[in-house]
Amino acid sequence: MLPSPPAAGPQLTRAIGLTQATAMVVGTIIGTSIFVQPSEITREVPTIAGILVAWTLAGALTFLGAIVCAELASAFPQTGGVYVFLREAFSTRVAFMWGWANFWSIHSGIIAAIAVVCARYIAFFVDLSPFEQQLTAAGVIAAISAINYVGVRTGTTVQTVITGAKLAAIVVLLVAGVAYSGAGGGDAWTLTVADVATVPLDRMLLGVGAGLFAFGGWHMVTYAAGETTDPVRTLPRALTIGTLVVTACYIGLNAVYLYVLPLDAVRQSPRIAADVAQLLVGQGGASAVSALVVISAIGALTGIILAGPRMYLSMAQDGVMVPWAGVIHPVYRTPHRAIVLQGVWASVLVLTGSYPTLFGRVIYMEWFFFALMTAGVFVLRGRASYQPAYRMWAYPAAPILFILASAAIVVNQLRAQPAEALFGAAVVATGWPVALWVTRRRG
């Protein structure tokens, strides 16, 4: 179902090329968790070989999701990304549910969570009280929103430069890790099939699920299809290159962590990259990694803050969000009001401290929509009008595998934390009566 064309007026500017789109994929995925938190995978998977296999599987499944998005983006190169894909495959009501969940919790919650981590690491260099950290986090959101407000070219330039610096720092850490020969390093590696086979299947699935969350954000580049040059070709390439680069970085970083530190230390460390850097280059290494976390957070936020308003713009133009949010700035050619709306709500989540409750309990529902989006490929391929410029390989095995993986994450969350998971589902479900109302009102 194609929407009515937007009213005449200022239009978005196509300023995102392959380099910028790829940087958006890489920079959005590589946020802070790979540097900061002890990997959930190491908690679930007891062997080094099993851990590396789990990361590899998570990367492979993310790649499958990326090629699903690549096909859909080549068929519908319109601003809005997953919202557009769900609308075209199913209905505006189903797509609205995705947008509803993202505005109130998932997307805004991601912004709030990364901004809070960024502020905590800024406090490594400047003494900040907890409240001052909240204000700093809100200030970071406001500053990056302002950058995106004044033009997509400015936002993507910042994103590309920071992503380049981030990748350079990762390469330095990898090289230092390979060259490390200090005593008291990691456990002896035995990379055999037996080391993988000894991992119980349910533990491996939990580990892979945790890894998939670390790869979050791979789909966000599709939200800016309306500002991408030659999106039919650019988006599939950016998604493919970006997910492969991130997978290589994640596997490499985890290999260094496990090479330099014992497995138990990796499991317990609350700031794994800083601990490794301190062993490799001394106390200055920990400071450098703290700076890297701040830079990485800013890079991720630049892409995430850029992406969300494009979805809200598409919703407003479809008549399912306040029309006020569907206006494009006459000079900057950006969805400036949607940017402000998103920034205000994400800051409210930071300042009230409510984002962990909403975000932590709803984020898993993202995978329900990913499964639904992938199922949409089967629906669309049955229509003669569906003519994507790029068709994913290994069809139908690849999309089926991704649907099963996405469903496994949802089911596992329901089993592991039923009360929290049902709360999250209820938050999303509140959007359905709203969807019925707005679509009926629209006519």
Image: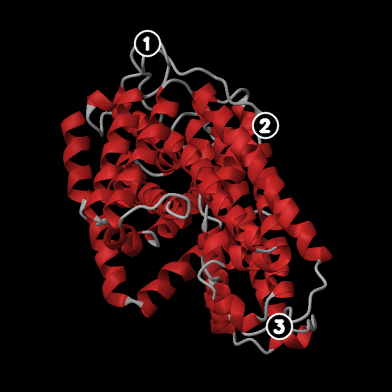
Between 42 and 310, the one lying in front of the other is 42
Residue shown at 61% from the left, 22% from the top: 229
Check whether the beta carbons of the residues at disc 3 and disc 2 lie within 8 A of each other.
Answer: no
Amino acid type indicated by mark 1: Pro
Labels 3 and 2: the sequence-earlier one = 2
Task: Give me the residue at 46% from left, 21% from top.
Answer: 151
Q: What residue is disc 1 on? A: 330
Amino acid under label 3? Val
Cα separation, mark 3 vs mark 1, equals: 57 Å
Contact (CB < 8 A) between labels 3 and 1? no
Q: Tell me if residue 443 can be seen.
A: no
Position of the N terminus, as image quadrant, is top left
Q: Earlier in the sequence, mark 2 or mark 1?
A: 2
Q: Is residue 182 above or below residue 301?
A: below
Determine the secondary structure under disc 1. Answer: loop
Does 276 appear above or below 7? below
| The C terminus: image quadrant | top left
Spatial distance from mark 3 to mark 2, Cα to Cα? 37 Å
Residue 375, horizontal then vertical, whole percent: 49, 53
Q: Is residue 242 left or right of residue 415?
A: right
Between 9 and 336, the one nearer to me in the picture:
336
* Image disc number at residue 19: 2
Can you give x and y, in whole percent of width and height, for residue 382 in the image? 53, 44
Q: Amino acid at mark 2?
A: Thr
Q: Where in the figure is residue 354, as x and y percent of width and height?
A: 24, 57
User: Circle 3 sits on which residue?
Assistant: 196
Dot 3 alpha-carbon crowd within 10 angstroms: few under 14, some 14 to 19, many 20 or more: many
Foreground tag (3 vs 1): 1
- SS of the residue under disc 3: helix
- Circle 2: is it few (<14), some (14-19), or many (20+) Cα within 10 Å? some
Q: Which residue: 63% across, 62% down?
A: 283
